[in-house]
Image: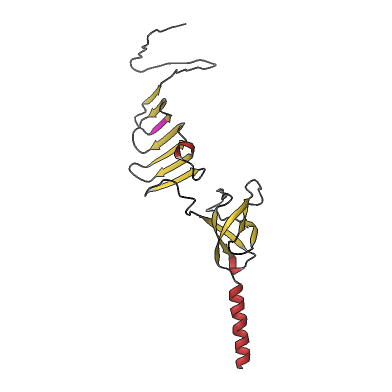
Amino acid sequence: MSTALYDTLRALIREELGAQRNSELGTVQAVAPADPGNYAATVALPGSDLVLDAVPLLTTRKGVASVPDVGDLVLVSFVGGDLNRPVILGTLYNDEDRPPPNAAGQFVIHLPGGESESKALRLELHEADPQRAVLKVGDACTLTVQDDDPVVTVDVGGQAAIEISRAGNVSISGGGNLTLKGSGNVTLEAGGTLALKGAVINLN
């Protein structure tokens, strides 16, 4: 092989490799969550004038959907190094967008991202001590299901609570009125003592 031909081939290979893209960081400019045929986002690549439209979003499996927010920093990969085949692999935290409070052994979903716990919808899955799932709707309500007593707890802002134990005991307490009402028959039945206590008891 002549030197000239070798140099030409090397230059072509270098040019081809230089044209290939691996992975780059981008900024989300628009999303299309409402379009059932377009689970994608528009991404701008910083440091260039490139704007990629309708970039597919990677998901962990079918049935899961979670689009990034406009302004999010995302990692974009190019299938086969082809600029025309981009895929968004995920969102990255940065100096402005911080992760929600979390600890080892936890899986946390916190929406909206960056909002305080008192105003956010938050799901915590704890793998131990004990295993439990905690769903918080701001300060309004907390639902806890755990592998311990009480197994189920619903706390409504500290003003009312429901607890269910392994033994089947159920406790309902509230700082306000408690009403049991049915459009049909209502039955109160106890295998043991039925106790009614109040300042005034009205039977009609």
Colour setting: secondary structure
Q: Position of residue 47 (x, y in %)?
A: 58, 64
Q: From the viewer's perspective, is residue 18 above or below residue 8?
A: above
Q: Position of residue 33 (x, y in %)?
A: 62, 47
Which one is nearer the viewer's eye here, 123 or 43?
Answer: 43
Which one is nearer the viewer's eye here, 189 or 183?
Answer: 183
Q: Which residue is at the far bottom? A: 2
Give the residue at x 61% y 78%.
15
Looking at the image, residue 109 sits to the left or right of residue 128; the answer is right
Give the residue at x 63% y 66%.
83
Question: Which portion, as a residue range, is magenta?
Answer: 150-154
Looking at the image, residue 190 sits to the left or right of residue 2; the answer is left
In terms of image quadrants, where is residue 173?
A: top left
Q: From the viewer's perspective, is residue 2 above or below residue 88?
A: below
How many numbered marks does the figure carry? 0
Q: Is residue 17 magenta?
A: no
Q: Position of residue 31 (x, y in %)?
A: 62, 50
In terms of image quadrants, where is residue 78?
A: bottom right
Where is the N terminus found, in terms of image quarters? bottom right
Residue 1 in sight: no
